[in-house]
Image (cartoon, coloured by chain):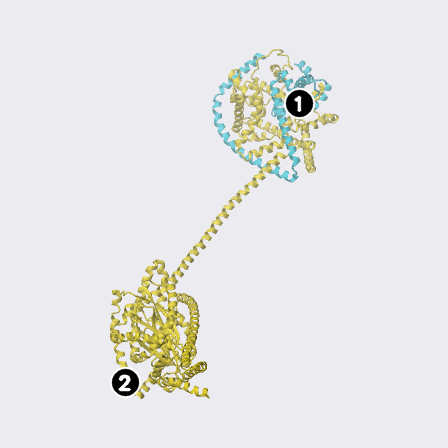
Amino acid sequence: MDQQQATPPKKRRHSEYHDPDYQQTEVSSQDEEETCAEAESPGQRKWTKTEQSDGMLPLSDKFQRIRELLRLEFQREISQKVEQLAEIDRRLLQGRQLLDRLRYQVVSEYYRKQQVPLTGADIAKVRGDSLFGDDIAAPQLPLHPAIKKIVGKRPVVIQNHLPERTAATLAKETIRLRNPAHRRAERRRQQKIKEQGIVTDHSKDKKDQPEQEPPISVKLEDEQPCTSRQAHERQVELNASRLNNKNKFNFVVGNTSKYIGEDSRENGTGGNALTYKWLVYVQGKDLPEPLEKYIKKVRFHLHPSYRPNDIVDVHRSPFQLNRHGWGEFPMRIQLFFQEHLQQKPVQLMHTVVLDKTMCGLHTMGAETTVEIWLRAKQAITKQKSGKPHPPHEQETAVPAPPLAAPNVLEPSVFAFPGESCKPRTISITQNKEELDDNLFAGINKIELSDDIEKIEPTVLVSEPLKLNYSPRKQPPTPSSPPRTQLRLNAAQVTASKPSVVYLPVNGRSPRQESLPERQRQEFSPVKHYPPASPQRAWKESSSDRPPIKPVPNGHHQGKKNVVFQRAGKLYIIDPLQRKLKQAAKQQSLLKPQLSLLKPPSETRWHMLQCMQHDHGYANMSGEMEEKPMLLPPIVDTTIQSRPRRLEHIFRSAQFRNMRSAVEFLLSRLPLASIDQQKEYPFTCITLEEFHNHTALKQRCFEYLRARMLRRCLMQHHELHKLDISGKEHYWSLREIVAFARVHGYTPALKDVLPVVHEKRKQKLSDEEQLARRVQAQLKGEPQPQLSAYSSLSSGNRLEAWITKQSDRLLGHDQQMRDKEFIDVLGVDKPHPLASRLTNSADVSFQMVNHRQLLYLPPPKHLDSTLQLVQEMCKDINITLEPEESPPGVSQPLALSMLGQVLRTFIEKLVRRSLAAKLQQETLEQLPPAAANAPLCLQPQDIGRVISLCSELDFLGNSHLGVAPIEPQI
Amino acid sequence: MSNPQEELLPPSAEDDELTLPRASINKIIKELVPTVRVANESRELILNCCSEFIHLISSEANEVCNMRNKKTINAEHVLEALERLGFHDYKQEAEAVLHDCKEVAAKRRRQSTRLENLGIPEEELLRQQQELFAKAREEQAREEQQQWMSMQAAAMVQRPPLADGSVASKPSEDDDDDDDDDY
């Protein structure tokens, strides 16, 4: 019972506390519930305390305890929220980094596309957009095709000029192109201003300003730490890439929202319930000067459902806009800067975010920060100042319409509400079409505009929202009652306990804001008067510069690529040159290949030489040895080589008389060689050849032989002594020639009677037979040598070949022998045959001699003499056997020597007899050759010679014991 | 006249033995003096002279060999015999022949060794011979061209000696005088 009695007084106290709040403001049901809960909790605590303690002291203690608990709870909540905010900041940074990357790629793709020429359709679209586009954005569109044109021209320019100059030229071109666009834009602006009423917007802004003050201050505190962090990071990142002339300024665009609830429907005139109240604001971060000095005005483009008041201009600070709504939508915002900054208006896209939790408290929706580079100093040139003169005139008309328009609109609204409804319906239908086009145009412009780098991230975010909320478009109708509610809500916030922490902050912020507002109100008429055109012109020019920079960069890259391509071409050419060089090398390689042909020829020649040396024929070996010597060297050298042999033999001999020396040489230097060896230029192979030559030629040969013979005499050592001593002198050429003719060393010469010719023919035939015999014997002779001395592994082959050759040659020998008998005179044929058969031993000796004699150069001559020698020695019972001069070879040296001696004996005997006979026939002129005279040796002639020569004393008895002087015969 | 001829001629038995050598003497005489006639009598005379000459030298060589206490006559023995008999010119000829024979022997020896090493078939040998002959012919053609040039030069030189014909005639007259005196 006591408990029941205690509870009513406590409840009364809480009810008393609540009554003034409820009376002051119309609180929603949610607020009442919250207050009840709060009241109940302290009540329970009081009951517990009352039990523990008694009287006044327990009450004071209870209050203290309650305060402590509340403080702890609030601290906990604050710390949690701080942590959450930190996480949010981190995520935002990451997102922005990613967006920056996307921006880079998009921009690069954009410029790549520019390189491609525009199609007709694209151009039409651009032009169409320009017609329906906003006044401010209009000049941007025509720039796009202009830029592309410039892009096409740049590669040529850059090739010819430096990059700096190109930038200047490009800037000039852009400025020229923009003048007509600028004019068109101004005209369109005037038309729109007339059609639309801006004054109404101003009146609305004024009314809304005081209501918005407290929530702004609250949000600023929350935002400051986050914004400062972001700003610092961005400054570090972007300072390097920006111009030095300009400074970076950060502007923030954001919105707050509050849930009103369904009660607002009663206040609303019609349509859907406006459950939310939102506020959009523009502020600066870390600005050295107040925002007013930078921004002239702000234009808000609202969702078309807000027609006819969807476009609002705010010319004073704070730059804010307050409205009721039911859904989220993207808002386009344009910032207009002061004249001296010469900056083009900047466009932003901001999505209005509402409180989805529906807590009924002012909540932060979303914020977007923008970095804008502005000129802190005033830099105006005469040229630029001159151009904006005509826009001044146009701009003078601009301020007049807004002043007139609001006056007209305001009384209509207040005086005749019914009439005002009617014209609104008419304007709605017209403006919807324009606004729809404007929005799309704005989007296109934003994509095409120069400030793409700044706007792109917001565009990407807003696209899905548009799609979601586009079907929900509805015409809103503002009303005065919800505004009054907003005021009451603000008061409640200040009064309520949970908002106690914010009270001092709220108090400070409105005071600061109130002062600048008053100043703005005082100076407002001045702002209207200054012209906006020069600012726009400067802004446009300044805005042109940033696009110039990236564009040439891209093109520079492209051209560098071109240059690289050229360099690539150069590299392509270089390998071609390398290929050519390689081809040349290959050609050079051909030369050594050709040179390689020589070694095999050399090897062949070497093999031939080896074969020649290895050839088994003694006689042929001599010839073969001579031939290789002849081929490579000159013929002259070959001639010298042969006389060297003869000279060598001649020098080794010891002569006591000139005559003996002359005879020695003449016997070895015949004009018609018997062995068919042409050793000297004056020798002929056969007598026929000698006879065929002319008389002069024959005599030339004769003379050359004498000449050579004389040289040999001159070179001989002993003969030289004889000449010096005076006993005998060198023979003259004439003497030698005469001696040769008389003694028969010279064959028959021409310039003789025809009778002699006939004799010559007979003799020639005889000589031919002799030559053939010699050839046959020469060919046949080597066979026994090989058969006797060859012991080879491949001997079978050689033996077979040799036998074949021997068979052929034997046939020749038989024929020749038969001819021999025919030629012999005074000899019986059967006798030699019979004697041969009887003398088998002689045949054996002959065979032996043949084998051994094969080594001798004139075998034929020695063969006949050797036969005589052998027979003569038999008479004396003397036997001459072969010797082994070298270890492996046996030669009949004694026989060969005696044969040679006998031959020389016969030669001297016969030739001297001829000479003696010719001398009998006295001739005054040079004696003719013995061969020409029809002589016949008689025994008398021979006997005479024997009697004359001392050497032949053993045959005669005329000069026994006496050594008379020898005649020159 | 008939007496010395009869003395030089050999007896009838010897005639039968010397039938073969006559053929060889005929060959030699034709080689030496192809265009001159030689009577049969003169040929017999030359043959007899040669036999006497060889008997002289060979007997002398035999004596030298006996003095050296050797069985076979050697080349050195022959040379020494020629010196003793006073045939200096003939000695020179003999030495020349000896030298040639030795050279041939040396070459022959070298060739034999090479042939043993080589196993060349017959066909290749024939080819080489043909090649060598062809080369020789080419060389001859070249030499002939050179001869023409040298002959022209020699013809020019030969003219001045003709002017000196009178000088040559004098020694011939002297020779005739000597002959008359002897006769």
Between A798 and A259, the residue placed more toward the observer is A259
A612 with respect to A145 (left or right): right
Task: From the top left corner, tell me how far across and down residue A71 is, in percent.
Answer: 41, 75
Between B62 and A202, the residue placed more toward the observer is A202
Q: Give the residue number, with chain letter if any, for mark 1.
A: A894
A912 with respect to A505 (left or right): right
Chain with colour yellow in the figure:
A
Q: Identify which amino acid the numbered label 1 is placed on.
A: Ala
Tint of chain B: cyan
- The answer to whether one can see residue A609 in this image is yes
Task: State the residue lying farthest toward the front.
Answer: A54
| Distance between mark 1 and mark 2 Cα atoms | 172 Å
B63 with respect to A348 (left or right): right
Please report the residue visible at 55 percent of the width from the left and 33 percent of the height from the top. Answer: A630
Q: With respect to residue A605, does B103 lie above or below?
A: above
The first of marks 1 and 2 along the sequence is 2
Q: Identify which amino acid the numbered label 2 is placed on.
A: Pro
The C terminus of chain A sits in image quarter: top right
Task: From the top left corner, tell me how far across and down residue B115 is, in percent.
Answer: 65, 35
- The answer to whether one can see residue A188 in this image is no
Chain of the residue on which disc 2 is drawn: A
Between A737 and A789, the residue placed more toward the observer is A789
Q: With respect to residue A888, does A969 lie above or below?
A: above
Task: From the top left corner, tell me how far across and down residue A420 is, in percent.
Answer: 31, 86
